[in-house]
Amino acid sequence: MKKPTWQRGRTDQGEIQTHYKYFPKHNITAVVGEYENAFLGGDMYGDEAIDACCFVSGSYVSSINGMWGIPKERILRLSEVDTVVFSEVLRDLHIVTAKRNK
């Protein structure tokens, strides 16, 4: 998730917790995280994986708790997410995972 529009969230002992992308026009933030083996400076074990993605209302403030720190009432159902926002996030995830699976 090294695209310029994605921000890296906080880390815990060098482990990356989340990346997030804010869509101000829609006041929605996409949050990707709960990575397996994603560390600063590169992939420590060679098997980095993205385990979760969600959409939250408003902007996202990264916490040491990663995605577990997001209040449940801020998490949107997919039906509440604008289709353009949803498709842009899926496109970005596809790009990242396609590079990873080569």
Image (spheres, grey):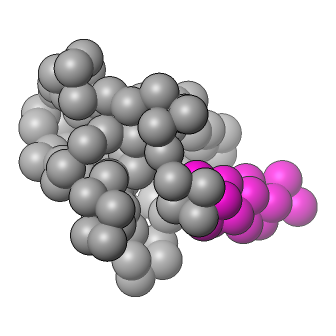
Name which residue lies at 17% across and 54% down.
59
Q: Residue at x 47, y 72 (%)?
A: 2
In this rendered view, identify the residue nearer to me: 83 or 69: 83
Residue 36 image offset from top left, x and y in percent = 51, 31
* Residue shown at the point (32%, 28%) measured from the top left: 75
Among the 4 quarters of the image, the one containing residue 6: bottom left
Seen as rendered, the residue at the extreme bottom is 4
| Residue at position x 40%, y 41% in the image | 55
Number of marks drawn: 0
Residue 1 visible, this angle: yes
Nearer to me, 17 or 60: 60
Residue 58 colored in magenta in the image: no
- Look at the picture and state if 73 lies above or below 1: above
Residue 23, horizontal then vertical, whole percent: 34, 66
Front residue of 59 and 13: 59
- For the record, the magenta segment spans 86-102
Is 89 or 96 nearer to us in this picture?
A: 89
As drawn, 19 above or below 18: below
Which image quadrant: the C terminus? Answer: bottom right
Q: Main secondary structure of the magenta part?
A: helix
